[in-house]
Amino acid sequence: MGSPKLPVLLLPHPLILLPTARVTLPISRSLADAILSLLDDTDAILAAIPLPAPDSPSEVTYGTAARIARLVRPRNQSSPTQPYLLSLHGIQRIRFPTPIHIDQSDTLPVHNVVYPSSEGTPSKDTVEAFKHAALILLDRLAKDSPQPQRKDDWLRVAAIVEDISEQRAAWMADVLVAAVSSQYPDRLAFLAATDVEYRLRRATELFIKQSSIQEVSKKIASAVDESLSRQQKEYFLRQQLAAIQRELQSLQNSPASVGTGFGTGGATSELDDDDQADADDLADLRRKIEALDVGSEERKVGIREWRRLKRIPQGSVENGVIRSYLEWLTSVPWPSNSTTTPLDVLKDHSFLTRARAQLDADHYGLDQIKRRLMEYLAVVRLRAIADAAQTQAQGNNPSTDTSPGATPTPPTKSKGVKGPILLFVGPPGTGKTSLGQSIAKALGRPFQRISLGGVRDEAEIRGHRRTYVASGPGSIVQALRKAGRNDPVILLDEVDKVGHSNFHGDPAAALLEVLDPEQNHSFNDHYINVPIDLSQVLFICTSNTLDTISAPLLDRCEVVELSGYTYDEKMHIAKRFLLPKQICANGLSDSQLTLTDDALLHVATMYTREAGVRSLERAIGAVVRFKAVEWARWLDKGNGAVGGEGVANGNGNAKLNETQDGNKNENGVGKEWRATVEPHELEKILGIPRWDGEERDREEKRGVVYGLVVTGMGEGGILPVESTALPGTGRLKLTGSLGDVIKESGEIALSWVKTHAFELGITAGRGVDPLKVPDVIDVHLHLPAGAQKKDGPSAGIAMICAFVSLLSGACVPKDIAMTGEITLRGRVTPVGGIRMKVLGAHRAQIRKVILPWANRKDVEHDVALEVRREMQFFFVRTIDEALEAAFGRGALGWRKETVLLESRL
């Protein structure tokens, strides 16, 4: 039949083409072009071979010779890679002389094929067994078929099988196996059966197996129907039982039934009468749905789900799912059921004054943040007054169209002022989270906090879809439900620690819609699946750093930096907030404990040198607890009534009689109560000062200077840059867990020093390497605290000063710190984090700071005036100016000689 060579087409797994069968599959454009070239022949035949399973060998031995029946390109084909549909009709089995390897390319390779002999007549017993198995299967398929047409088709096929001859039995086996659903290995083994006798036996086994499967499936379906019937009966009986219980309860609660040993005397519990409570909940749910705005999306969804709820039996699982959804839908503060700030409050002339007073009462300083919030409040007030005036004008001037068919124009509804998206960035303990609570109190709005630290699943922000078990809304909708208003203050805490893209989704990307003022008016929660307006919500984000926040998310926020507090600000915070809080928390009163200003300053400078005030609060708490123990012992000795405060004299000391300060008992508690804590007492209470040693360790030493750094939490500080010379080969060694950028700064610094060694007086001649003349040395540069990673382009000036000090012998004073990047041309370029670095230097009692000239505006704008008054700033443009500011005028002995060049032709 045809040529012994045929083009081979690979059928996708698990597709198998049997003789007499027909199959349609999508193909690519290149494969379609190859098939079109075959259609030039009047009888286009190709070999269709099945693709083996992924875990089976990739060699194929058998296939089917197929005729190309149709090749079309439908218009509605969705796959761009496979736009054509190919229909094949199986003709005859084929065999390959040698197994071929599978190549899934879009080509039609040509291979030699062999047509097995289809002649021969099977035995009579085999044919009878085949007919018997086929008739049983066809009868089962006809009984189980739900469609009458399909049932008639199976019966007609059974009639044909009864009258089939022995010569046509093999052909009928191919037809039935192709029509009956079977497993892939069974169909593949049947395709390889070239012998007629063996083919009928394989078909008989397959029919018996399929009949058993159909019988078991029927039994399982019947068992499921019986189970459903049993559940319906159980539901009916439970309803009857509930009705009987209600009747019994009504009899017990009636006055006529109260007697000796009978009835409960009318005593009821809120746990009784579950059906009545359930009916009340459903009635309340219906009232909430009816209260939604007519025509709104949430009302349409609520009505549709309510109708579904009434159609579903009460005991079913779906009933509980729909009811939970309706409870969430109606609890969200929609514009129709949400309350806002009353207009009378906004019209009050003291509204802005009271809001600013509230902010000042809760937080000291932070003028930039307070100014931004006052701008927002002023806009809210003016917008509300303007909307009220517009509504009143519409009421006074109704439409002149009084025709019967005219529809009155409803008053326009104000959308309010869009809430700003504020991002507070600063080190821990600077008041970012507590500032959000103060803002909500000043605005008169509810406050909700959402902690994003460690969030790894997008569904925690946008909610789970209702298709999942135990699904629910996201944290944004939950916060709105708790607030009960559509304009709360929501604090997104630790937004820099939210998880990034993983197999659960990207929570940071889910926040983009929440924090975008142009998109959050229609925020879509996956569970609620109704647009929710978040434009009136005042979102406040907090972060310790900006490095881990994605650029699109950062672009949507107004960044406000809280770099840290000065000592003056810490003193005010401690006296106004921290000390009264700790006194109240530890059971004392203001008259029983007083910390002098010197003592508070000593605690802030020697025990808690940080950007925030958390460690300061802990230290003050330790002092208050120490005094609380002394006060309790003083009371136990009979010096005062328990719970009393004693008698306070003018110096703040409680007395019962006139004694000396040093008159103490065996417990170390004197008969005279001392309420004042002096600085010299702190070492006994708090231990040895933590930061006292740093000032002693700082000394003027050759090769050592101090640079300004910003830690990973945004806190500024100083870091010594140490260098030393040792015998070697003229190399530079850098240690201290340094990154690539800071290593390059060290190499640039050493290159500049080598180039200008003669001008600096380090070498005696030009072009002389100071690391090789007069002695060959290595320079080792080290930044202490090697366990901490360090990187960034801001240590160039400090490294140059360290190299110059090492090679020239001059020393930089210990009260000078510096920051700034350098170039090979000798320019000083600006750096970031100036406010944090300056505050860190101020905490470390640095008096002189060297900064790039381009950062002058940062100091004037961001650094407090009291800090600038206590420090001296040197703004430099070049390395020469930086060296002169660090070492002092004339300390290095610059050689400013004029170089004469002779030109020769």
Image (cartoon, rainbow, N blue to C red):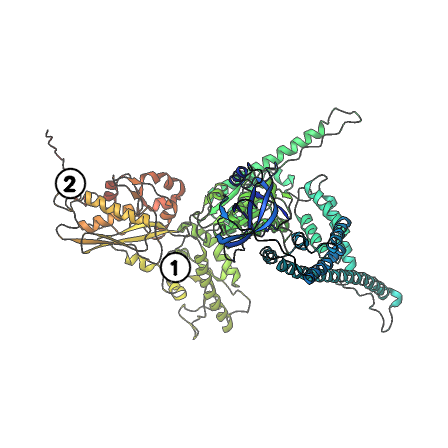
Q: Extreme bottom residue here? A: 666
Quadrant housing residue 419: top right
Q: What residue lies at 44% left-to-right and 63% top-to-bottom?
A: 623
Q: Extreme right residue here? A: 256
Callout 1 secondary element: loop
Residue mark closest to the camera, 2 vs 1? 2
- Closest to the observer, 544 or 195: 195
Residue 242 x %, y %: 81, 62
Disc 1 crowd rating (10 Å Cα; few below 14, some 14-19, many 20+) is many
Q: Mark 2 = which residue?
A: 895
- Is residue 552 shown above or below 467? above
Q: How many marks?
A: 2
Quadrant housing residue 863: top left
Q: Mark 1 = which residue?
A: 607
Give the mark, 2 or 1, whose residue is nearer the N terminus: 1
Q: Does residue 535 appear anywhere in the picture?
A: no
